[in-house]
Structure formats: structure tokens, C-alpha cells
Image: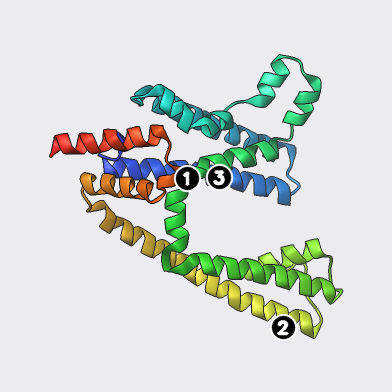
Amino acid sequence: MEVRFKENKKLYKIYEYSMVSLALIVVSILIFELMFNLSESASRVLYLLDNAILGVFIVDYILRLIVSTNKKVFIKKNVLDLIAIMPFSSIFRAFRLARLVRLARLSKFNRLIRASVWLGRFKDKLLVFVKTNGLIYMIVVTMLMILVGATGIYLLGEMSFVDGIWWAFVTATTVGYGDISPVSLGGRVLAGVLMLVGIGFIGMLTGTIATYFLAGDKRVQKTYKDEMLDLVKDKLNNFEELTSDDIDDIHFVLKGLKNKS
């Protein structure tokens, strides 16, 4: 489906960005549930939203399976997608497996795995994004500085390490809630360094987003044939990891391009 869908580049881009956005919403829901003590009504809304997104991915999997030329190959290549959309808690409950139901209620962990699988489908796009303008290096530096800041503020005795992580994260992202803040000179120096790193990270992030989408407009100008050949080249770069099914797919794509020319 993906190969054929790419013939209409605009629709394919909308599809890609929509699916990535939905996976990121699932991650955001998890973060909200972990970081905040939500009311019962808020938790219910997030639960319904999560299930609605799950429904979208179930429909997406079924449609991709239907339009795939080789169902067996599709299932083999998308085993993780299939596992991710399985409603394990409902299955366990239907069979009245009480202990498994309790395990299945670790829904945060299940949803984290599910979101990871969904985002994994677009790992190539995500890798291109984080490598744009060297953003990956700034992400690493910022994460290291958050850990250093949390460790430093903990060693200064101003707060626990967990609170230190929260404080360092809030400071580095330039949000600055002010719920906890350092009072010692060392703590304030750490805060200043984190602020400077955070400003640099936010600036690079916004610049990278703009660069990525501008470069995307240039990529749209490439022909369908060029895109397919690029995909084949990417596959061949990992020749040792190719399966017989991958080789068959490459042969199918090349034969189709040859027939069109």
C-alpha cells in the first residue's frame, strides 16, 4: 500500500503526519497521566481519546492489509503493528482470567509499547528530522545537562533527585513554573546554565522544524521513480539484513519501474 500511496505525494504526506501526530498524542496522554493527578472525568476523557486513536490504527492496519498485494508478506513485516492493536485487556476479561486482567491494567506500559511501535513505522522520517541541522546533538546535550542539573541540585541538598529532574526539565524547556526553585548560589548558577542550554535547544528545534518542512517541499519535486530508487538503495545499504521477502519486494519494485519506462 505504501508504495502505491506514494504516487499521490500530498495525500501520503497528510497520512504520514496524521499517523505520527496520533502516536505522539498517545505519548502525551501517558505523560499527563504520569505527571499529574488527574480527576476521574479527565482520566475518562483521555481513556476515550486513547481508545479512539487505537480504533484509527486498527482501521489503518486492516486497510493496509486489504490493499497489500501479498497478505502473507504484509503480516510478516507488520507483526509488531498487529500486536500493538490487540486489545489485550478485553481479551483477558472475556476469558475471565482475573490475574491477567490485573496485569493488563498496566495500561500505561501497554500504551507506551503501542506508541513506540506506531512511531517505529516512521523511524526513517524521524531520523531525518532529528539529524536536520544537527538537532540530535542538541537533544543529547540538553538531556545530559538536565541530568547534570538534577544531580547537582540534589548534591547541593536543595531537593530530592526526582524533584531535581522535574526542576531541571522545567528550567531547560524555559517553562519555569516556579513551584520549586534553588536558593543557593550554586543552584542559581546551575539554573542559569540550564536556561542558556534550553534557549539554544528551543531555538534550534523551531529552526529545524522550518528547515525540515522547507526541505520537504524540495523532496516533493522528486519523481516517483527517483523516490522508489532511493528506497531500494536504502534497502541495499543494509544488504546483510535483507530477507528473501525483502529481495522479492525489491525485484517487484524494479520490475514495475522498468515496465513503466
Q: Earlier in the sequence, mark 1 or mark 3?
A: 1
Q: How many marks?
A: 3
Q: Earlier in the sequence, mark 2 or mark 1?
A: 1
Residue placed under numbered mark 2 in the picture: 189
Q: Earlier in the sequence, mark 3 or mark 2?
A: 3
* Picture quarter with the C terminus: top left
Residue 158, position as x, y percentages in the image = 84, 73
How far apart in space, not on screen, are marks 2 and 1 (Cα)? 38 Å
How far apart in space, not on screen, are marks 3 and 2 (Cα)? 35 Å
- Which amino acid lies under the numbered mark 1 shown in the image of this protein? Val
Residue 181 visible? The answer is no
Q: Are marks 3 and 2 in contact (CB under 8 Å)?
A: no
- Which amino acid lies under the numbered mark 3 shown in the image of this protein? Ile
Taking 10 as reference, is 205 left or right? Answer: right
Seen at 62% across and 40% down, the residue is: 113
Taking 15 as reference, is 111 left or right? Answer: right
Residue 65 visible? The answer is yes
Residue placed under numbered mark 3 in the picture: 25
